[in-house]
Image (tube, grey):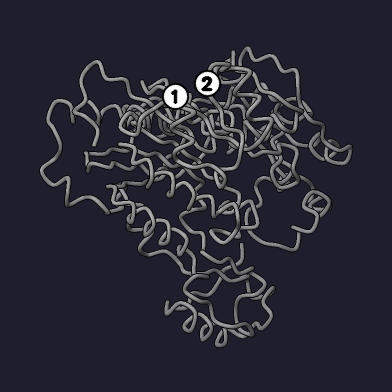
Amino acid sequence: MTAEPTAQTAHFSISLFSGALGLDLGLEAAGLRLRLALEKDRAAVETIRLNRRDLPVINRSITEVSAQEILTVSGLKPEEVTLISAGPCCQSFSTAGKRHSVNDPRGDLFFDFCRIVRELRPRFFVMENVKGMLSAAVRHRRLNERGAGFPPLTKEEQLGSGLDLIREKLGELNYYVIFGLLNAADFGVPQKRWRVFFIGSRDGEDLYLPSATHCDPEFCPQTHLLPWQTLKSALHGIKSLQWCDFTEERRNLLSKLKAGQNWRDLPPRLHRKALGAAADSWGGRVGFCRRLSWNEPAPTLTTAPDGRATTLCHPSKLRPLSVEEYAALQTFPQSWKFFGSTRQQYMQIGNAVPVQLSAAVGRSIMKTLKLTEVNGLPTDAEVRKGKVICADPELDVRLKNRKLTQLHPPRLRKIKDPDQARQWLRESTEQPFLQFSEP
């Protein structure tokens, strides 16, 4: 057990899946002291060393690292570890990826995070991941293999089963855990970037999600919050030196668009050229052939601003956002340097947690530390252990009422008969059938 904290106590943290340290820079800004980073990617490790030469780094996969090695390299004793921070590789949960979910080897990294927490028993942990974690399945079944003509879904193939498993495994750690969905733009980050945060307390202390400081300008008069930061304000004074290039075809299409427009604003004859194979798909596809708007926060930064489905074109220049603009939109300090090729730098920045968002999470943990110092542990601290609670009542309702699967629109199904689709859904989910409306 950790000794009762005092005003002079130093609060040390250990970082797993550290990347370029976006999550940890914010936690440091809130008052935690980073003592070790663990990161497998060589370019990210060099970024850490470029900026923090004195910080110990373990440059191996977490699957090969023991809790004892973490203590030895960090120079900490178990009782000195206040917090473990982690953002296990998110590609297996992301809606932009192939969504293999927890069965993907990258999803398995979550279990190694649990192993380290179980063995080190830090006072707190923070785990961050993409919004897609909330709806991921333990086993992902492709859309074109769902519906009449295919076997019913198993429980592990239902949407949300991944979150159920994560909650179960976190509960087994015997921590009190809260989680919620945070939009980085609500904390002064010039980017609409939704992320799920899990915050755990070993001792059952009071935990809080940070309260928003900013909001959509439309609602500012009613809330007294600050307006979201815009792309224009964030990029003011940023000198761009590095960026990748669009193909000539992509440049020709983007040259026909104004700030804030995308493929839908092109002449219909060019839609298929802009979308490629996605022209026969469905959904908004807003990331295709997109110029950003000056007057809004940026959309979520991906690891490839020139991707066909993830185009992040500068509002007035015929190029993707630069590396320097990426870093500004992730609220990295301007002095922070990134190692590697342009592609490697985009990867590090796009995968990072916005520093200003993680600082807000860090301040919520520091609030807990101060309250415990003054008031002691809550009377129900022991009862809380092992519980994993959604801290946002509205999100909790949405999760309880979530759809357990989704089907292609009728035109793309193997068997188009709605009665057979209804029967398949009953067998797969026991939910009422909802006819799909094509966009």
- The residue carrying mark 2 is 55
Q: Nearer the viewer, residue 234 or 372?
A: 372
Q: Residue at x 13, y 32 (%)?
A: 376
* Quadrant of the image occupied by residue 352: top right
Q: Amino acid at mark 2?
A: Leu
Q: Secondary structure at mark 1?
A: strand
Q: Earlier in the sequence, mark 2 or mark 1?
A: 1
Quadrant showing the N terminus: top left
Q: Position of residue 135 (x, y in %)?
A: 48, 59
Badge 2 crowding class, 10 Å Cα cut-off, few under 14, some 14 to 19, many 20 or more, is: some
Residue 387 horizontal side relative to residue 307, left or right: left
Q: Residue at x 31, y 47 (%)?
A: 177
Q: Amino acid at mark 1?
A: Leu
- The residue carrying mark 1 is 34
Q: Position of residue 416 (x, y in %)?
A: 65, 82
Quadrant showing the C terminus: bottom right
Above or below, 247 relative to 31: below
Badge 1 crowding class, 10 Å Cα cut-off, few under 14, some 14 to 19, many 20 or more, is: many
* Quadrant of the image occupied by residue 365: top left
Q: Position of residue 95 (x, y in %)?
A: 59, 53
Q: Residue at x 41, y 42 (%)?
A: 197
